[in-house]
Every structure is written in structure tokens, then in C-alpha cells.
Image (spheres, rainbow, N blue to C red):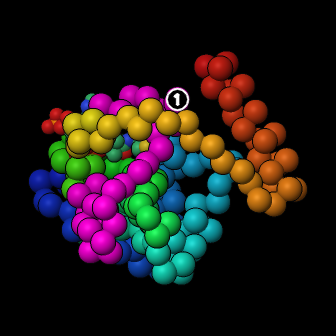
């Protein structure tokens, strides 16, 4: 389906009926990894009390989405996506502005976000919006040892598939 970008999408919180369309959008935008469960991520963001998923709705279509949350200190942006046929019309900028407003209304002074190394192209977008490199290294740990092993294998396979491209 081709989105009608002559109209302004409305940005609003996700509804239950939007979940599959949002997951489909994230898939089309290359944001899903085998070790993440986007449906579970959406559930947790909505039910945790400190997260949200915002969608950009154009008529019946979801043409953009972003997940936002906070850890009590800083906001964090995840899964920012604009449908390929709706890009470069300012929607990504509007979604990030909505995420910033979500943080401001909760008194959060800053936003952090991660850009995967294989997605370095998106840095120009974030720089245009005033984001800067923290010059930090991001570390993580999966807390379930079984899942940690599975995730390490999936990440190694993913890295090998990227290297083979
Ligand atoms: C990144 C993304 C959300 C940008 O959405 P968008 O709606 O096209 O962005 P905007 O139109 O609001 O762009 C705002 C500004 O960012 C910059 N920008 C956006 N895309 C860019 C690109 N591909 N290259 C260079 N600069 C870019 C431009 O300065 C642009 O302003 P301009 O169009 O007036 O020149 C979209 O490309 C996307 O969904 N990508 C795939 C998913 C992804 O990688 N998400 C980020 C995960 S970290």
C-alpha cells in the first residue's frame, strides 16, 4: 500500500488493534532481531507504567511508530520507524519530537538512544535533530542464563550474516 503523504499523519498512543501493523512496519524497516520479541516489548512498554508506543496514523494505515521509555533518570527511544514510502517528509522528526514531549511532561531532562553499528546511516538523521555522540560504549547483560546463551548464538549468527553481505 502506498501511503498518502499529502495528509498529515496523527501521532497518538498505540491501540490494541495496531500491534500487528506496528510489528509489520518495524519488520519492513529492518528493526526486528531474532533475539527480541517486539510484541512482548510493546506489552512491557505499555504495562510498565514508564513506557509508551506512539504511532503515526494516516487514515487506516500506520506509517510510523516509536517506543519511548525511561529508567527514572533518562528517557530512551527505541524502534523509531517511518514507512519507506513516507520518508523525508518530516515524520521521523515529528515522532522524535513527540518522544521528547513525552519525556518533558515526566520531568526527564535528557534522552539516550542506541544506533546499531550496521545502521550508521541513520546517524545523519539524529544529528540533524540535535543528538550527539556520547562517546561511551554501551554494555548489556541478559539476566536469564538460558536466554543469554541463546541470544549470544543468535547475535553471532546475525553478525556473520551481516559480514557475508
Ligand atoms: C530514520 C527514519 C526514522 C527517518 O525518518 P524520516 O521521516 O525520513 O525523517 P525526516 O523526514 O523527519 O528527516 C529529518 C531530517 O533528518 C535528516 N535525514 C533523514 N533521513 C536521512 C538520511 N537517510 N540521510 C541523511 N539525512 C537524513 C535530514 O536532515 C532530514 O531533513 P530534510 O529531509 O529536511 O533534509 C527513517 O529513515 C527510518 O524509518 N529508517 C529505518 C528505521 C531506522 O533505522 N530507525 C532508527 C533506528 S536507530
Instruction: Using a 10 Å C-alpha cutoff, classify the residue at mark 1 as few (fewer than 14 neighbours), some (14 to 19) or many (20 or more).
Output: few
| 76 lies left or right of 84 | right
Query: Residue 160: which quarter of the image?
Result: top right
| 97 lies left or right of 76 | left
Q: Nearer the viewer, residue 100 or 118?
A: 100
- Verify whether residue 143 appears in magenta: no
| 118 lies left or right of 34 | left
Residue 148 location in percent, x, y? Answer: 80, 51
Residue 124 appears in view: yes
Range of magenta residues? 96-124
* Ligand 1 occupies quarter: top left
The yes-or-no answer for disc 1 within 8 Å of ligand 1 is no
Query: Residue 70: which quarter of the image?
Result: bottom left
- Point out the residue furthest to the top here: 164
Q: Is residue 93 above or below residue 71?
A: above
Which residue is at a point 72% across and 51% down the rendered structure image?
141
Which residue is at a point 58% across and 65% down the rendered structure image?
41
Residue 44 location in percent, x, y? Answer: 57, 73
Residue 152 location in percent, x, y? Answer: 78, 41
Residue 110 location in percent, x, y? Answer: 33, 56
- Verify whether residue 100 appears in magenta: yes
Q: Is residue 157 above or below residue 81?
A: above
Q: Name the residue carrying label 1.
A: 118
SS for tag 1? helix
Q: Nearer the viewer, residue 97 or 22?
A: 97
Residue 62 appears in view: no
Which residue is at a point 46% across and 53% down the rendered structure image?
79
- For the C terminus, which image quadrant? top right
Q: Nearer the viewer, residue 165 or 42?
A: 42
Amino acid at each position: 500500500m502506498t501511503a498518502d503523504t499529502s495528509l498529515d499523519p496523527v501521532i497518538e498512543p498505540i491501540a490494541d488493534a495496531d500491534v500487528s501493523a506496528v510489528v509489520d512496519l518495524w519488520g519492513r524497516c529492518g528493526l526486528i532481531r531474532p533475539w527480541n520479541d517486539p510484541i512482548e516489548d510493546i506489552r512491557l512498554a505499555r504495562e510498565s507504567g514508564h513506557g509508551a508506543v506512539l504511532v503515526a496514523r494516516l487514515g487506516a494505515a500506520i506509517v510510523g511508530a516509536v517506543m519511548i521509555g525511561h529508567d527514572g533518570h533518562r528517557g530512551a527511544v527505541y524502534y523509531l520507524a517511518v514507512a519507506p514510502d513516507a520518508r523525508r517528509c518530516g515524520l521521523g522528526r515529528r515522532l522524535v519530537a513527540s518522544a521528547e514531549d513525552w519525556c518533558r511532561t515526566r520531568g526527564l531532562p535528557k534522552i539516550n538512544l542506541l544506533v546499531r553499528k550496521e545502521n550508521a546511516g541513520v546517524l545523519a538523521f539524529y544529528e540533524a535533530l540535535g543528538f550527539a555522540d556520547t562517546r561511551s560504549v554501551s554494555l548489556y547483560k541478559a539476566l536469564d542464563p538460558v536466554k543469554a546463551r541463546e541470544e549470544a548464538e543468535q547475535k553471532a549468527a546475525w553478525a556473520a550474516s551481516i559480514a557475508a553481505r
